[in-house]
Amino acid sequence: MFADVIVDISHSEADKIFEYSYSDCGVLPGSRVLVPFGSKTIEGIVIRTKESCEFDVNKIKPIVAVLEEIPALTRETLSLSEYVAKTCYVSKALSFRLFLPAEMRKGRVREQFVKYAALNENADIEEILSSLRKNALKQRELIEFLRANGKSAMSILNEKFGGAVKALNDKNALIITSEKRFRSPYKDLGGTAKKVVLTEKQRGAIDFIQNSEKLTTLLFGVTGSGKTEVYLDLIDKTLKGGKSTIMLVPEISLTPQMLKQLRARFGENAAIMHSGLSAGERYDEWWRLRTGEAKIAIGARSAIFAPVENLGLIIIDEEHDGSYTSESAPRYNTVDVAKFRSSYNGAKLVLGSATPSVESFMNAENGQYNLFELPDRINQKPLPDIEIADMRKEVRRGNNSPFSSILKDEIAKCLEKGNQAILFLNQRGYSKTVVCTECGHVQKCSSCDVSLTYHKEDDSLLCHYCGAKYKMIKACTECGSPYIKYGGFGTEKIVADLKTLFPSARVLRMDRDTTTSKEGHFKILNEFSSRNADILVGTQMIAKGHDFPFVTLVGILDADMSLHFSDFRSAERTFQLITQVAGRSGRAGEAGKVVLQTYQPENHVLRQAINYDYKGFFEREISIRKATAFPPFTQIVRVLVQSENDELALTSVKELYEELSAIKKVREDCFKFFGCMKAPLKKLQGKYRYQILMRIDNGNEDILDSVYKSVNARNKGKINAYMEINPNNLT
Ligand code: ADP
Ligand code: ZN
Ligand code: ZN
């Protein structure tokens, strides 16, 4: 018999099918195998088995070993990996890696086995007992123990009965077995299932999703409208029907929270896929899903590749979130992958959001998706009032602090009542920039074209793009002046200022710097939700999904930040962010309040956001996108060429541009934009970056294929070239 194998080498030269022979019946499509390759033995995946081969049969080598009894990939994930390779323009080997826990490759983690002993049913225990010497007390006790308790762990038996275990085993009185043990992460999450009676609206949503013919439903529900309960009920029904679920959340920090709810309700049926787990835990959770022992996969975007079979439901919570687009190869879009799995399995796909992406809402309007709305908060709690604080006036009044007087007052009131507040700011560190007051020089990273952020905690300057750390300067590196100014503020500074303004308030900070450890997120969130703190200061991380009932005040410290990006999505992002952060306020009990600080109070996006006018926002935004030929009406294709050698990168990108111009010439009318330029981030991690930007009408995959061929041909030696489709980040 023969097998088509993809070897685990991501080079494009190795990106083809290799044939091997085998006689072992354990070789199945999807099996991971060891195969000879050149002078080495490497891992590969069987994609097909067959009776005959195309290559010279005398030269075909045999498969060395099958790595797991159960094929790692299923029929479905095999074809999904092909789809990913094709649509994300990556090698098959690279696409396979999405489906396997990293530690599975190269055999870095072994399964853990536990040994058990039981009485041998085929042995005459009475006879053995009577043959025992009088003083063999331990052996008698062991037999009694096993009679009473049945199969028991060897570790326990050895401890209790010592040498008697071996002695009885030598008399053939025992059966010793070895069983796989699963390492279980977040074992002590605790939590009990919240008993809620679903509202009529929630039941309506569930019936609608279950009974609809279309597979995809956009669940457009305001923050606090009870979407999570809808998800849980749908998962329950799916589980009862014997099928599995994939549930995605946008932020890794939200997974333990969601896992807690799932565990409380579905016990060991829930498995978590989380990059923060230990290698062993990750491996074991993956196998629990693969074997069907667990039927609910929960995680951030990569959990869409969960190895579950018999998929009945996929939920993507906060579907609009940028984290659902992968920024490194393979650059997949999670919603597209979900659609593949949904239609392959006939599984329901639920996209939930209070601020759907413009694309999803358009699909709901044009009938590609179902639309179900939950326009009210549970118990008719009003959405919090959003008040604008005009920071221009504050500056005119001489207030240069990060807090407007309105916000200061509201914080004081909130603390007085014993409620909690969340302050949001999308900048970690102490100050955003460090500037010389004499010559105006801004300290920059030597390998990136970006300014450095001051971190007071360890008196360092940090590059937020490459992570490089520099010592804080004593004097300007340009002119030597000792007069250094901090420009802009970050979370560290906010916490410091709060300590001065409200000395008795207990303040927590949550950003990338405070959540480096595995359970860092979880600890901070737990502290806050158990009311061991009054104010939570944080970045993007705290904007999403969290349900803190005692938060009555949210402060958005710099609402303009995301408006400044030159990205076509900046209006959409800003609207989403404000709505999401505001949604953390007043979710139970008292009515909530939001203070939004801005230098552009008239901006229409801010106006629509404070009025919770999603549809108004959508109408305006979609007509702009249409008029300017931006997604979802076209596809943005970005080609990035980078090299440590600036000249080389420039020459290469120019040549590539010429090549692509030839493609454009033939299909002129499909191109809405075509240009070559420096990337907004001119230098990153020591590499100079140039880009070719294109906007191409939808549905021209053949053009994309040709572009990719040209780009890939350039990707060698000192040049790194790659292509992105609708990237999230255009820096
Ligand atoms: P969303 O995900 O839409 O922001 P959640 O699902 O977090 O909203 O619900 C908001 C709050 O309302 C939660 O505390 C949740 O437990 C509660 N809740 C949801 N549904 C019900 C219900 N039917 N009855 C009572 N409380 C509910
Ligand atoms: Zn200077
Ligand atoms: Zn850097």
Image (cartoon, rainbow, N blue to C red):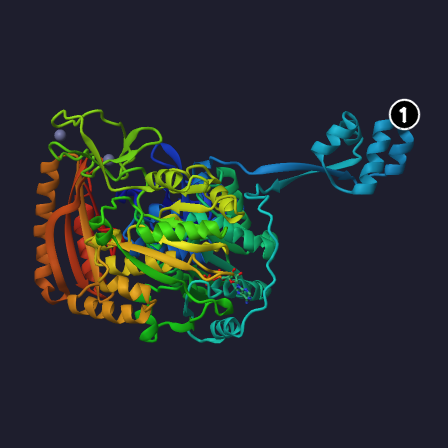
Instruction: Provide residue 447's location: percent of width, then percent of height.
Output: 20, 33
Direction from residue 2 to residue 442 in the image, left or right: left
Total numbered labels placed on residues in the image: 1
Q: Which residue bears the numbered disc 1?
A: 133
Instruction: Provide residue 674's location: percent of width, then percent of height.
Output: 11, 57
Instruction: Provide residue 633's location: percent of width, then percent of height.
Output: 22, 67
Q: Residues within 10 Å of mark 1 (few under 14, many from 20)?
A: few
Q: Nearer the viewer, residue 587 or 64?
A: 587
| SS category of the residue bearing label 1 | loop
Direction from residue 294 to residue 399 in the image, left or right: left
Name above or below for residue 194 compared with residue 97. below
Disc 1 residue type (three-letter): Arg
Direction from residue 143 to residue 268 in the image, left or right: left
Q: Nearer the viewer, residue 320 or 244?
A: 320
Instruction: Tell whether circle 1 marks a residue whose Cβ is less than 8 angstroms from ligand 1.
Output: no
Q: Note whether residue 519 is visible.
A: yes
Q: Residue at x 24, y 57 (%)?
A: 570
Instruction: Provide residue 27's location: percent of width, then percent of height.
Output: 49, 48
Direction from residue 360 to residue 689 in the image, left or right: left
Q: Residue at x 31, y 28 (%)?
A: 459
Q: Residue at x 54, y 47 (%)?
A: 530
Q: Note whether residue 70 is visible.
A: no
